[in-house]
């Protein structure tokens, strides 16, 4: 039985790094096959989410929050830690993500997708920030949705390095790089400035590969996790990489009716 209350879940997908290869002790613990399996786990976690059962799902909102593909030339020697160049990564990522969006569209009335680019997709520091392989991926998905007019998938591509939109009257702000934590002085001030400038009730960002939630009054702030585990760079720096993606239920009365981290199989 449902409560009859409408809900619009927001799924944050960021730092998927399709194309990255991670090897530990001679064994690949992350590659394209493992990435696709993990991504499917996240999608299936949304479809089977028990927290949605009491509600009427009016729409599914998806944020593609950057670093969807691994890119190239982001750090020295990166070419030895990928399955191919950025173009080949793009083609594979587009197919995987489109299949995932189609799976969501079969379960929910409409799937609205909002996008923002990450840092791994940038072509170089000499070009525009928007010259970004993530944006090429997003435009590809938008073209696919315009061709498949009965898919129920709507893709909104970004105009700058952040995106603002509304869900059930609540304003959402998303960008790829936020702050490591939103509770210390300088970081909290930066987040508060963004919230004020964008009049945001919800703020989603990625980049740091570790899901955490913060609150400033009634504003909820979500730092997303990743799809891959820690690579050699993160290991060297002692960073904690957590393979989780946020799912947040938004109703007319509550901008966080439920909050959940979806995890792929290890």
Image (spheres, grey):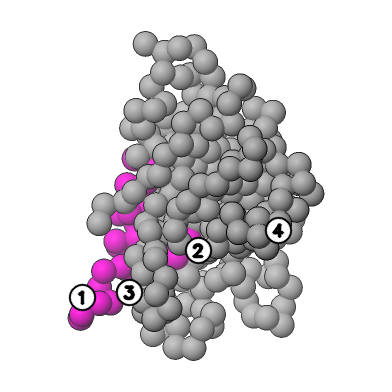
What residue lies at 58% left-to-right and 43% top-to-bottom? 215
Within 10 Å of disc 1 (Cα), the crowding (few <14, some 14-19, many 20+) is few
Residue 60 horizontal/vertical position (percent): 52, 33
Q: Which disc number belongs to residue 190? A: 4
Determine crowd level at label 4: few under 14, some 14-19, many 20+ residues with C-alpha closer than 10 A. Answer: few
Per the rendered image, the range of residues in magenta is: 15-44
Question: Mark 4 or 1 closer to N-term?
Answer: 1
Mark 1 or 2 closer to N-term? 1
User: Residue 22, labelled with which disc?
Assistant: 3
Question: Residue placed at 30% from the left, 62% from the top?
Answer: 33
Query: In front: mark 2 or mark 3?
Result: 2
Instruction: Return the residue at label 1.
Output: 27
Which sits in the foreground, 21 or 212? 212
State yes or no: residue 39 in magenta.
yes
Q: Secondary structure at mark 4?
A: helix
Badge 1 marks a residue whose secondary structure is: strand
Give the distance between the C-alpha atoms of the residues marked 1 and 3, in whole angstroms.
8 Å
Residue 239: percent from left, percent from top:
42, 70
Quarter residue 216 falls in: top right
Q: Earlier in the sequence, mark 1 or mark 3?
A: 3
Q: Dot 3 surroundings within 10 Å: few (below 14), some, or many (20 or more)?
A: some
């Amino acid at each position: 039985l449902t409560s009859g209350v409408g809900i619009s879940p927001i799924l944050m997908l960021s730092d998927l790094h399709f194309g990255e290869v991670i090897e530990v002790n001679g064994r690949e613990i992350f590659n394209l096959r493992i990435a696709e399996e993990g991504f499917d786990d996240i999608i299936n976690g949304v479809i089977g989410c028990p927290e949605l059962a009491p509600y009427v799902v009016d729409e599914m909102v998806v944020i593609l929050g950057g670093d969807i593909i691994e890119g190239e030339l982001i750090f020295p020697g990166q070419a030895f830690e990928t399955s191919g160049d950025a173009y080949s990564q793009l083609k594979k990522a587009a197919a995987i993500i489109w299949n995932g969006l189609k799976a969501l569209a079969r379960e929910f009335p409409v799937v609205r997708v909002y996008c923002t680019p990450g840092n791994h997709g940038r072509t170089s520091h000499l070009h525009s920030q928007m010259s970004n392989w993530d944006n090429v991926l997003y435009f590809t998905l938008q073209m696919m949705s315009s061709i498949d007019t009965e898919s129920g998938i709507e893709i909104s591509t970004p105009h700058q390095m952040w995106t603002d939109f509304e869900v059930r009257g609540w304003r959402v702000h998303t960008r790829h790089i936020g702050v490591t934590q939103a509770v210390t002085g300088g970081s909290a001030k930066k987040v508060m400035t963004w919230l004020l400038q964008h009049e945001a009730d919800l703020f989603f960002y990625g980049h740091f590969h570790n899901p955490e939630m913060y609150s400033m009054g009634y504003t909820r702030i979500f730092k997303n996790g990743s799809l891959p585990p820690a690579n050699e760079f993160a290991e060297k720096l002692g960073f904690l990489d957590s393979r989780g993606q946020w799912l947040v239920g938004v109703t007319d009365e509550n901008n966080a009716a439920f909050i959940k981290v979806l995890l792929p199989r290890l």
